[in-house]
Amino acid sequence: MTTPLMSLVWTDHVTGRRGFLVVDRLVRGVASGGLRMRPGCTLEEVTGLARGMTMKEALHYDPEGRYLPLGGAKGGIDCDPRDAESYGLLVRYLRAMRPYVESFWATGEDLGLSQDLVDRAAADAGLVSSVQAVYPLLDDESAARQRLADAFAVEVDGIGLGELAGGCGVAESVLAVLDRAAVPYAGTRVAVQGLGTMGGATARFLARAGLTVVAVADLKGTIANPAGLDVEALLAARDGHGTVDRGVLRPDDRELPGDAWLSAEAEVLVPAAVSYAVDGANQERIRARWIVEAANMPVVAEAEALLAARGVTVLPDVVVNSGTNAWWWWTLFGDIRADADEALARIRRSMRALVGLTLDRAEADGTTPRAAAHALVTDRLPVIAERLGWYR
């Protein structure tokens, strides 16, 4: 892995808590990557996430598109987002990072933070927008900003389009893998860790495609039902952190420990919450055939090697959860309108192509899908750099 372009550690003068910013690479003078908040967040974690953003940008490179790749970056704050001090900490972090957000770091929601919260904190920190670094690259800034605002105002059955985009991409990745293996959707069981923005939308799209969601895990534990959960009822009963009100559970729904999702009788596991969720020890409990990484870096390298040795395929995060980032920029740069049908169709089409390309490369090279994704990025980055350059 290459050394990041910039790595920064910030200490809050009020709480003593730390925040991080890593810029892996600039393209056209800008890097894209969200801001996460979780207890235990580290510089190493943020560094890996920033590199992943560089890869996601490169994997969605379309020479004919209006949106052309940016570099990769990531921010992180070591704090529980439910802590009473978290909002003030977020504002102070963004105030400290203001020169970078104004000039070259376009950011947004990630683990622990919603886009609404990031937008409010950015305004309180004196920023025009969390993505204002991109504005000089736009043909018509006013129209682009209105288009993005309109897109975030779109709802589909009670859930905002911005919350659905990433999960649509994850679900389509699952469906693409099943189609490739000629496995019917009906009867295919799925367990999802995390029922926040990414996990919740993934569960909805998979259930609507005909798969059976047999387990979901949140901060309180795992909810399971071998016959299938009522996904829409669970989604409607979530709080702002993706925790389900147990009062909506049906008599045959079971409450299990938080890590029970790992050993669920399911063909597909979707870790959609924290990083490092699957390690060398707990991977032994996994019975699934596929792990589809909706979260960033949920399967550690040791675990992935052990899983591969026993025939479990891990579809990597840089492919699977890249739909959110792509949707933002397709909308802002004008490749798509603020329309749910158009947006979700574009995400599905793009993810199908990207998953197919990744798995074709893995087969051709005799490697894992993650190694194949890295190889694709290695091929594309010099092409992107030659065409677009690092700086404006």
Image: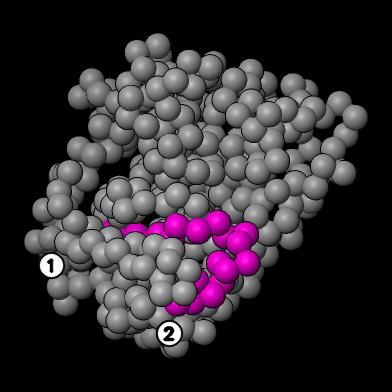
Determine the image quadrant of residue 365.
top left
Kind of residue at disc 1: Gly
Quadrant position of the C terminus in the picture:
bottom left
Based on the displayed image, in which of its 4 quarters is residue 99 positioned? bottom left
Q: Which residue is located at x 63 percent, y 21 percent?
A: 264
Query: Is 392 above or below relative to 366?
Result: below
Residue 239 at what x, y percent from top left? 73, 56
Q: Which label's residue is closer to the chain start, 2 or 1?
A: 2
Q: Which residue is mark 2?
A: 127
- Find numbered disc 1 in the image and state the secondary structure of the residue it sits on: loop
**Residue nearest the observer in this picture, 210 or 284:** 284
- Decide if residue 64 is in sight here: no
Residue 167 x %, y %: 55, 48
Answer above or below: position of 215 versus 98.
above
Numbered range of the magenta stretch = 70-92
Which residue is label 1 attached to? 389
